[in-house]
Image (cartoon, grey):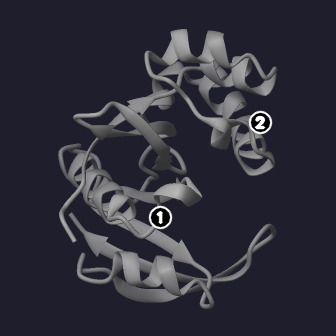
Amino acid sequence: MTTQQIRLVALSAAAMEALLADDVATANRESGVELTELFLDDHSKWLFNYRLPQVKGDPGSARWLIHAIVSEPAGLVVGHAGYHGPPDENGMVEVGYTVDAQYRRQGYAKAVVAALIEQAAAEPGVRVVRASISPTNAASLATIAGFGFLEAGEQWDEEDGVELLFERSV
């Protein structure tokens, strides 16, 4: 499998608001990329509703939260990714990503994890990158393999149930 080339485009509060209102044209203008139906599904809207107050309360946090995953050189949006927030008091950021079903198993998730680790490593306040994954999510477990993550415990997530925690230094 060839390595996919991607770039991450942060979504502003205005783009998220437009998506929540099903106004894709405005969201596209705000983001500068052509967003897909994935950005209008229930999971994405839940995510935007959750993250929008963070961005409105701290506009600088937008660079940490939701990004469109853009495949290059085609400029095709293949999913969304980001961190759960800016680094915490211990210098930890947690990654999250969703690749549109039609683009899965093509290397985009691995490219996103690599890009998020690289971006985090470039930030002076970040020391650890975390991934939380359901023990039954074989695809995500395989995605992080080879990136140096070590199992660091587990947690209970209200949305997803039991999640295994994986961390790596940057």
Tell me where residue 17 appears, x and y as whole percent: 72, 20
Q: Which callout, 1 or 2, points at the residue further toward the start of the chain?
A: 2
The circle drawn on residue 49 is: 2
Residue found at x 67% / y 37% = 37
Residue 14 seen in the current view: no
The circle drawn on residue 95 is: none
Residue found at x 22% / y 34% = 73
| Distance from the alpha carbon under mark 1 to that under mark 2 | 25 Å
The circle drawn on residue 104 is: 1
Tell me where residue 138 appears, x and y as whole percent: 52, 87
Q: Nearer the viewer, residue 150 or 21?
A: 21
Q: Nearer the viewer, residue 57 or 41?
A: 41
Instruction: For label 1, count other residues whose C-alpha is less than 10 Å away and answer few (under 14), some (14-19) or many (20+).
Output: some
- Indicate whether 92 appears above or below 76: below
Q: Amino acid at mark 2?
A: Asn
Instruction: For label 2, count other residues whose C-alpha is less than 10 Å away and answer few (under 14), some (14-19) or many (20+).
Output: some
Residue 24 seen in the current view: yes
Disc 1 element: loop
Tell me where residue 50 appears, x and y as whole percent: 74, 41
Tell me where residue 58 appears, x and y as whole percent: 56, 24
Q: Quadrant of the N terminus?
A: bottom left
Q: Amino acid at mark 1?
A: Arg
- Whether the residues at callouts 1 and 2 have beta carbons within 8 Å, the answer is no
The answer to whether 99 appears left or right of 72 in the picture is right
Disc 2 element: helix
Residue found at x 53% / y 12% = 30
Q: Nearer the viewer, residue 155 or 13?
A: 13
Q: Quadrant of the C terminus?
A: bottom left
- Indicate whether 105 appears above or below 79: below
- Give the foreground label among 1 and 2: 1
Q: Nearer the viewer, residue 19 or 150?
A: 19
The answer to whether 95 appears left or right of 137 in the picture is left
